[in-house]
Amino acid sequence: MKLPYKRIFSIIVLLIVSYFIGRVLYREWDKISGYNWSPNFLWFLPSIVILFITYIILGYGWTMILRMIGGRIEWVRGISIFLLSIFGRYMPGGIWTILGRVYLCRLEGVPDSRSSMSILLEQAYPVVSAGMVFTVSLLFWGAKANLTKILPVILLLPLFIAFLHPKPFLKIANPILLRMGKAPLNISLSFSNMLFLAGYYSVYWFVTGTAFFFFIRSFYPLDFYYIPILSGIYAISFVAGYVTFLTPAGLGVREGSLAILLSFFIPTPIAIGIALLSRLWLIGVELTILLIFMLNAETRKMAKTALGW
């Protein structure tokens, strides 16, 4: 029985990052264990607040897409559905986030076709904008911009923008949907709306990069100059975790990618420690969101419905 190409790719990526992290952990364990990992709360608390805001930005973005394609839903309700659905990422298979969101939208009277289309678009734009943000961030990877750093921006940005146009997007998305037994998409979004969404999610990555900067700064001194660089690194590491299918929420792959890229700017042992701690940072904020759901009667009912409690 042949393994699907995407699973083979996922295994290769997972082995590479596991080898990198394992090798450094073995060689540098004394430095990692001897480092002071007590965070500076004057920097750590802002990272929590800003990270929480990024989840609201994501929820607002998905609700905006759903309304753009005709899904009638209240803003607060849409953001609540999005925030609740993120917990499906921690289940193997990567499908539970989608199923949970479609089901909750169905309860709000939104047809499955529109909610499914909105989810596909909402998953595509962060990935495309992540590539754009990372490409632009290469300009900041040194004191002076030279041709080596400018060339990727010149070559890659037009490709990302071209992908946003409905025609090339549908040529890629529809064959995938047909193989899944789904009806092809007929996107009514204009090219200007697609550019707006790409810009919106690019801003999201910059805000997330700012939160990540404060998180790192609570453990290791960095200048504010590194915010654009960290925005690109965090964005492309998200993509690395997103395109692998073996672990829930890109567990391990995202951290490995972060560690590799951060090691260009901070000592490798510290980069690995920060990459691993960043997962706890994310989980902590997401558990706080779940706790808020459980404290409110209306959102608690939504959570119990979605989780089958």
Image: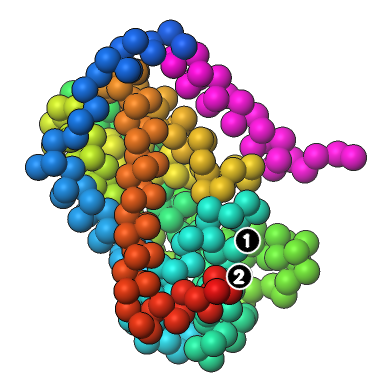
The answer to whether 175 appears left or right of 68 in the picture is right
Gap in angstroms between the C-alphas marked 1 and 2: 6 Å
- The residue at the point 44 percent across, 16 percent down is 25
Residue lying farthest to the left in this orientation: 42
For residue 237, the mark is none
Q: Secondary structure at mark 1?
A: loop
Q: Secondary structure at mark 2?
A: helix
Tell me where the magenta segment starts and ends, as one range. Answer: 1-25
Residue 251 counted in the magenta span: no
Q: List x then y, in percent, for residue 279.
A: 39, 41
Determine which residue is flagged by label 1.
95
Relative depth, front residue between 113 and 15? 15
**Is residue 66 positioned above or below 246 on the image?**
below
Relative depth, front residue between 197 and 35? 35
Amino acid found under the numbered disc labelled 1? Ile
Residue 9 counted in the magenta span: yes
- The residue at the point 37 percent across, 57 percent down is 286
The answer to whether 138 appears left or right of 114 in the picture is left
Amino acid found under the numbered disc labelled 2? Leu
Instruction: Assign the magenta stretch its main secondary structure.
Output: helix
Determine which residue is flagged by label 2.
99
Whether residue 189 is visible here, answered yes or no, is no
Q: List x then y, in percent, for residue 202.
A: 33, 54
- The residue at the point 51 percent across, 35 percent down is 252
Q: List x then y, in percent, for residue 72.
A: 45, 89
**Is residue 140 positioned above or below 175 on the image?**
above
Dot 1 and dot 2 residues touching (CB under 8 Å): yes
